[in-house]
Structures are given as structure tokens and as C-alpha cells.
Image (tube, rainbow, N blue to C red):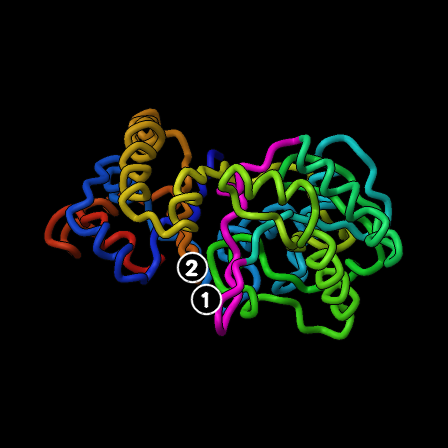
Amino acid sequence: MPHLLVPFAACSAAACQAALQGLALPGLRALVTRLAPGATDAGTPEDLTPPHERVLARARGLWQGDGRIADAAWRLRHEGHDPGTAAWAWLTPCHWAVGRDRIRMAPPHTLQLQEAASRELLEAIRPYAAEDGIDLHYRGPTRWLASGEMFRGLACASLDRAAGGTVDDWLPRSPEARTLRRLQQEVQMLLYTHPVNDAREAQGLVPVNSFWVSGAGALPAGALMAEGPQVHDALREPALAGDWAAWRERWQALDADVLAPVARALDRNDPISLTLCGVALARTWGPARAGWAGRLSRLFGRAPSAAQLLDSP
């Protein structure tokens, strides 16, 4: 059954709520008025794992508790490699901006980090990581794969929690994270004067001065290799950057290009589900019983607006 998942559908930030006002999403309205409410996955904004990652983790058999989602090991197996019983994690090179009383992480996609520079930074970090039993593998400019016992059982915050936010709020605090914190400090000192960063600053780019760990753990026995819901993450980058005007435009494009055609597929009686995710909550709609659209219209007095639909996520 087609199941669409939309992360960052809304949040309680005043600027986001303002962007919602008057936002016309006819495809979303058509879908929801013909689907029925299903499961609600309620969390808190302080959870290490955001709701869209909780939904995916459960669908893939990876859910082992907040912050304990072995996404790196799952992705390795999904791509045809054997993760074995080792513990794996994603390492994301990033920029931490140090302020007077807090450190903020720039969203990694804003770094404009190129492959050659990323590989050079990885090789510089490799011997320091090896001293702590960590093996590094390049997977993309802002996506490195790591294996090591440090990551077994490590509860860590999603990159989507920390990116664009305050780092101190999301750093791992467990005893097993002490070695990781020390390694981060060593890497920060190493990169402070690295030639890659000298070249970046000469180009007007911020330095790469740390890394973030996410998706840690060994692959659980009950893991499923199916992808799960179809993730449509066009809203992710503008939401993390706090660019709510761009977020609003992306919502309109997503509605026209994806949701409206799916809504029309209901005319063929195709079984469809939709999950909208916010900062703390995921709400799912699924196949409706006869008469549901009329009851929803009576509840709102008319078809619900986008602001009404997206109030909770």
C-alpha cells in the first residue's frame, strides 16, 4: 500500500505559523478529506529521534528506543553489504559556530563541501579515530560511515535535531559518550589550522571544524530490508535553515506535484496512507470508511484549511 511520509510539515515557531496562514494546499485537503485518521505517534521536542525517523525506524524494524536507531548499519545492508555484528554510525562533517553562551551547528547542506576537500579532511581525522577503534569510510561530502565499539548502544540525537540548532542541547551525555566527546575536541583542534579550512575561508566559506554522530548501533535481528514509507523531504532544508518563505514555496510544489496526483489516485480506489510529521508528533491518515468525508466536512463546516490540518504536526 502506498504510504507517503512528509517530514517537517509544520512546527510551532511563530514564523512557521505565519507562513501557514493563507497557504493553499488543495492536494493535501483533497487527500485528508477522503482518508480517515489513523495512528498518532506523539513525542516531545526534546526527543533525540524526531517523529519522521521514529516512523521509518518502526517500519524497518529498527526501533530500539529514543536515539537508538541503527540506521547506518541498516543502510549498509540495504545497499547489499554485510554489516555483520559490528556497530556502525554516520559521521557528518559540520561547522559549529561558537557564540558567547552557546554553540550552533550550521545545516550541513549549507557548507558547499566538495568531495576532494571532504576526503582530505577524512584522511586527516582517520588516525585520531583509529586510536579509539573507529574505522572511517567515505560515502559522500557530508556523509561518512564509521564502525567501532563506541557506537554499540550509543543513544545519539538525529542530525535533524542538531542542524540549525544549539549543539549543547543534543550532545550525548551517557558514560559511553565520553570518548566520543574527547575525539570531537581533538578533531576541533586538528581542523582549526587545516589547509582545507584555510582555502575555504579564502573563498568566503565557513570552516569545517567538527563532526556529528547519528544512526548508531548494530543491526538488530528483526530488521526489515523494505524501505518503508515513501519519504518526501522537500521541506527539510528550508525548515532546518529557518527559511519559512522557501518552506512555504516547497509546500506548494509538493502539494501540486505529489499530493494532488495521489489524491486523484483515490478515484481508482487505490489504498493510500499519508503521514505528516512535525517536531514532536506524527499523524497518519489511511483508507476511509464510507461517509467519512461528509463527517469531516461537518466537523469543520467546510473542507479544512492547511493551517487546520498542520496545526498539530
Specify start and end residues of the magenta stretch as a single range: 97-115
- Residue under numbered circle 1: 45
Q: Earlier in the sequence, mark 2 or mark 1?
A: 1
Q: Which amino acid does label 1 sit on?
A: Pro
Q: Which amino acid does label 2 sit on?
A: Val
- Residue under numbered circle 2: 279
Number of marks in the rendered image: 2
Q: Which residue is located at x 50 percent, y 49 percent?
A: 107
Which is nearer the eye, 223 or 109?
A: 109
The answer to whether one can see residue 77 in this image is no
Secondary structure beneath dot 1 equals loop
Which is nearer the eye, 5 or 160?
A: 160
Q: In which quarter of the image is the C terminus?
A: bottom left
> What mark, if any, has residue 111 been given in the picture?
none
Q: In this view, does 137 lie to the left or right of 38?
A: right
10 Å crowding of disc 1: few (<14), some (14-19), many (20+)? some
Residue 262 magenta-drawn?
no
Q: Contact (CB < 8 A) between labels 2 and 1? A: yes
